[in-house]
Amino acid sequence: MERNHSRVRQSARNSEAPRGRRRWWALLGFGAAVCCAAAIGGLAARDSSADYAGLEQPVWAPPAEVFGPVWTVLYAMIAVSGWLVWRRGGFGSALSAWGAQLVLNAVWSPLFFGAGQYGLAFVDIVLLWSAIGGTVLLSSRISRVAAILLLPYWAWVSYAALLNLAIWQLNA
C-alpha cells in the first residue's frame, strides 16, 4: 500500500515538472516580448541624447540619463505582470490588452525620436495610457499583483505624456 502511494506521489511530481519548466519558459517569453519592444524603442532613440537636450523643454523635464534606468525597471515589471496574468488566466482579453499596450509602447520612440513627429507621438502615448489603464483593469480581475505591477508604468507614462505634450507645444 505504501509503495503505491509513493508511486502516485512520484508520478504527480514527474507530471508537474514539465508544467513547472514551461511556466519559467513562459516568463522568459514575456521577457523576450518586452525586450523586443525595448529594442525597437532603443534603436529609434539611440544617439538621441543630443537631440533631446537640444529641444525646448519644460523646467520639469528630466535629464536624458534618467530614462534608461527607469525603463529597465518598468519593463521588468511589465513582463512579470503579463506572465502573472497568463499563469492565472491564460490567453484572454487581459493579455490582449497587455499586448496592445506593448505595441503602442514600441511605436512611441520611433515616432518621437526617429521621426520627430511629436504630435503623432502624443496621440500614440494617449492611446498607450488608455491601453495601460485597460490592462490594469482587466488584469486586476485575474491577479491583483499583476495590476499593481503596472501602476508605476501607468504613472510614468502619465508623466511622459505631459512631457511629450509640452515638448510638442514648445517646439512647434
Image (cartoon, rainbow, N blue to C red):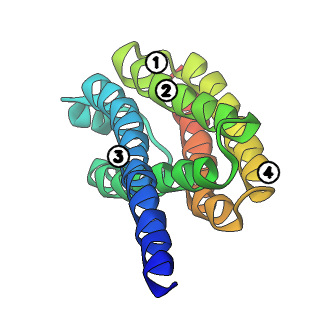
Label 4 SS: helix
Give whichever of 68, 83 is nearer the camera.
83
Find residue 53 and report its image quarter.
top left
Answer yes or no: is residue 38 visible. yes
* Circle 4/circle 2 CB separation < 8 Å: no
Which label belongs to residue 111?
A: 1
Identify the residue shown where x is 50% and y is 47%.
58
Identify residue for label 2: 108
Give whichever of 115, 103 is nearer the camera.
103
Q: Nearer the viewer, mark 1 or mark 4?
A: 4
Label 2 SS: helix
**Sequence-first tag of 4 and 2:** 2
Identify residue for label 3: 28
**Sequence-first tag of 3 and 1:** 3
Question: 132 left or right of 75?
Answer: right
Whole-angstrom CA distance, mark 1 to mark 4, is: 27 Å
Vertical comparison of 40 with 85: above or below: above
Q: Quadrant of the C terminus?
A: top right
* Circle 3/circle 1 CB separation < 8 Å: no
Q: Amino acid at mark 1?
A: Leu
Whole-angstrom CA distance, mark 4 to mark 2, is: 22 Å
